[in-house]
Amino acid sequence: MTELIVESAGPATSLQDAGRFGWQRYGIGPAGAMDRVSLAVANALAGNAAGTAAIEFALAGGRFRVEGGSTRVALAGAEGNLKVGGRPVPPLTSATARDGEIVEIGAARSGMFFYLAVAGGFTIPPTLGSLSLHHRTGIGGLKGSTLRAGDRLPLRLSEPTGPDLALPGPPEAPSGPIRVVLGPQEDHFTDAGMLTFLGSEFTISDRADRMGMQLSGPKIEHGPKGYNIVSDGIATGSIQVPGNGLPLILLSDRQTTGGYPKIAAVISADLPRLVQCRPGTKLRFAAVERTEAVRLAREAEAALRSLIAKLRPVGRAALDSSALLSVNLVDGVVDARGSDSDTG
Amino acid sequence: MSDEPAPSRLLPCGDAAVSIEFGTGIDPAVSARVLALDAALNAEKVPGVIETVPTYRSLLVHFDPLVLDYDGFKTRVCKLAPTLDATPTPGRRWKVPVMYGGSFGIDLDATAERHGLTPAQLIERHSAPVYRVYMIGFMPGFTYLGGLDSSIATPRRTDPRPMTPAGVISIGGIQALIAGQAMPSGWHILGRTPVRTFMPEREPAFLVAPGDEVVFAPTDAAHWDALDRAAEAGEPVAELL
């Protein structure tokens, strides 16, 4: 059996897949990769379906040893660097790590989260259908924990199949203000409060993690309905504004319900670039209609599909579909395109 | 409780969720409609719907915006809404043992004093009602109950405690709560139950569900250790009545 052994890893390094769904009615949040697009790209490079569990790093990298066989690894997300057996691996390229070799991931040069995918994924038993670690509650991951030196991650494949793969460039990221759909409790804010929200610059504070991103900036004024509501459900990207008037954007490790009014929610197409922003980043919000948000989600999904369609075996100029078919990679690519609804 | 059901509202929560709201307060008739819609939608298995989350007064539907036909879904919900039964159907009734006061319920004495009661009277008022489970939310197994005796309703603490243990039995405003795990809390802690509302390795991992009923049964220190050990070993400890 091939294993990846953790020699060192940053404190917030954890297993993450597309998320844990179906349990929010019992208070179990979805967890899952903060940046689903980067998870999908890392997996595509490793020949996996988009939502396969990978190792998520936050700012700090890590060092792993391969034992018992070989594997193919790929890194995507925040700008980092990957070395396999001391050999630098070009960005957006997978590489084969042989028995005994070290896989080393440097700290992020820009951005927050990056993903190391391994061909075939891990054979770690999922918790409630997912390997994603919900950091605060210790559900999922490797025995409910972040990855630490000495942990052994068993791999599904003892040897990788097919060639190493490369992509011509990173996914296109939108720019400009972070787009939101207003509501569901925009009626808890005064007109002045709404103007503050949509017309001001906010700064991502140091209180930003997988659960949420606390912003600092001008206070958003609540209306006569106040800042308490009878608790209702929360969607990923929801922006709640408690009594202090400062927005908190709720992310993968969020609670499932809450009692503060939610002024808006970040559209799914803008979540990947939002979570890659470091504390200190300044941002603005712009409101779009729900239908426009859906159009943008479809556009983002189409862009990811067309990027993944450009996967090339390393060292080849053009796509050789017979070569891909012969190594059974197409399944993974098709899955990456079709099965993951959360990449948009 | 009104005879005429309030019109429901569909409130988008970004592009991947919608809140279907039946009211603004804590009301058994509103909750009954939420749970009826929850059951109806889950029976239909609408393509693109990922999961539904019933809360006090609304149902949050998480969906895949690339798959769900939103307008068709909206039409379906609008047709279903007026047909939903606002009569709460009695769910299962659970007897939940509680060790009140002392180190188990650090706010029992102060809360009793605040309401001009003895600790024993407060325990009696807290353990008398049949509570309804309105919602499980926030964090794993946090069970939100309605039916608290309004004479002991207590506004939340102004200084939340940074950490409270799993199994805490507390009250906040007109709500009562069974805490699924250790968490910061601004509620008043009257006691603690050995019942694990959530244990991932147990079958079933969750005990109570929205729509169920809960009664609290005071227990004593002599029984606590045995109950706690049994719960840790995977016994429900909560009894179905």
Image: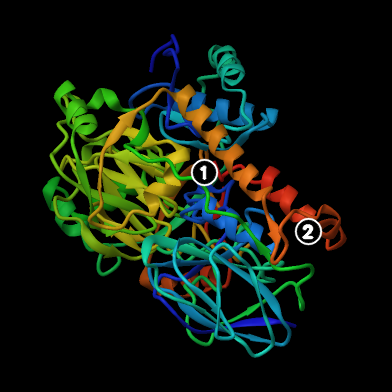
Q: Label 1 is placed on what type of residue? A: Arg
Label disc, if present, on residue B148 of the rendered structure: none
Residues at discs 1 and 2 in contact (Cβ within 8 Å) = no
Please determine whether, in this image, residue A250 is positioned above or below residue A84: above
In-image side of A27 versus A223 (left or right): right
| Residue at the spot 61% in from the left edge and 30% down from the top edge | B39
Q: Is residue B20 visible?
A: no
In-image side of B189 versus A324 (left or right): left
Outermost residue toward the bottom in this view: A100
The spot of residue A7 in percent (x, y) is 50, 86
The spot of residue B131 in percent (x, y) is 42, 40
Q: Which residue is mark 2?
A: A329
Other residues around mark 1 within 10 Å, as few (<14) / some (14–19) / many (≥20): many
Q: Which residue is mark 1?
A: A25
Q: CA distance from mark 1 to mark 2?
A: 37 Å
Q: What is the number of callouts on the image? A: 2
Q: Say which chain tag 2 marks.
A: A
Please determine whether, in this image, residue A70 is positioned above or below residue A21: below
| Residue at the spot 79% in from the left edge and 70% down from the top edge | A161
Q: Label 2 is placed on what type of residue? A: Leu
The numbered mark, 1 or 2, whose residue comes first in the sequence reads 1
Outermost residue toward the front in this view: A317
Q: Say which chain tag 1 marks.
A: A
